[in-house]
Amino acid sequence: MPLHLLVAYYVVDHAFVNNRKLAKMDDKKFWMHFIWVVLIFLAFTFDVFLSSPLGMLLLILSIGLTVTVDMGRKRLPNLLIEVI
């Protein structure tokens, strides 16, 4: 299970957006990024995580954590978010 989450996180975090430009991104593109986050996580993990209640909980928590980190990258200084 953790390997699916790791691959999904790396694809979401590095393939679709430049993390340094999240702060300069307008709101419409920023919300579209969150839609892509959900779709990519579902694409990489649907067969493993949607088969059990614990898997669904882990999927929701991992999407929530990724969205929280991305929102922090938009609102917090780059140095602080890189330390986190």
Image (tube, helix red, strand yellow):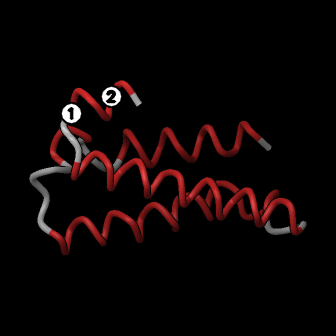
Q: How many marks?
A: 2
Within 10 Å of the Cα at label 2, are there few (<14), some (14-19), or many (20+) other Cα atoms? Answer: few
Where does the image place residue 7, in percent across and percent down from the top left? 59, 40
Q: Quadrant of the N terminus?
A: top right
Q: Is mark 1 on a helix, strand or loop?
A: helix
Where does the image place residue 75, in percent across and percent down from the top left? 22, 52
Q: In this view, does 51 lie to the left or right of 32?
A: right
Label 1 and label 2: CA atoms lie apart by 6 Å
Q: Which amino acid type is marked by label 1? A: Asn
Reading the image, the residue beneath label 2 is: 82
In the depicted view, which residue is nearer to us: 4 or 53?
53
Which of the labelled discs sits on residue 61, or is there none? none
Residue at 23% from the left image edge and 42% from the top image edge: 18
Furthest-bottom residue in view?
28
Q: Quadrant of residue 78?
A: top left
Q: Quadrant of residue 46?
A: bottom right
Where does the image place residue 14, in percent across and percent down from the top left? 37, 39
Furthest-right residue in view?
52
Q: What element carries label 2?
A: helix
Within 10 Å of the Cα at label 1, are there few (<14), some (14-19), or many (20+) other Cα atoms? Answer: some
Q: Say above or below: 27 vs 72.
A: below
Residue at 32% from the left image edge and 28% from the top image edge: 82
Residue at 56% from the left image edge and 59% from the top image edge: 63
Which of the labelled discs sits on residue 78, or is there none? 1
Q: In which quarter of the image is the C terminus?
A: top left
Where does the image place residue 58, in percent across and percent down from the top left? 74, 56
* Cβ–Cβ under 8 Å for marks 1 and 2: yes
Q: Which amino acid type is marked by label 2? A: Glu
Residue at 23% from the left image edge and 44% from the top image edge: 76
In the depicted view, which residue is nearer to us: 15 or 64?
64
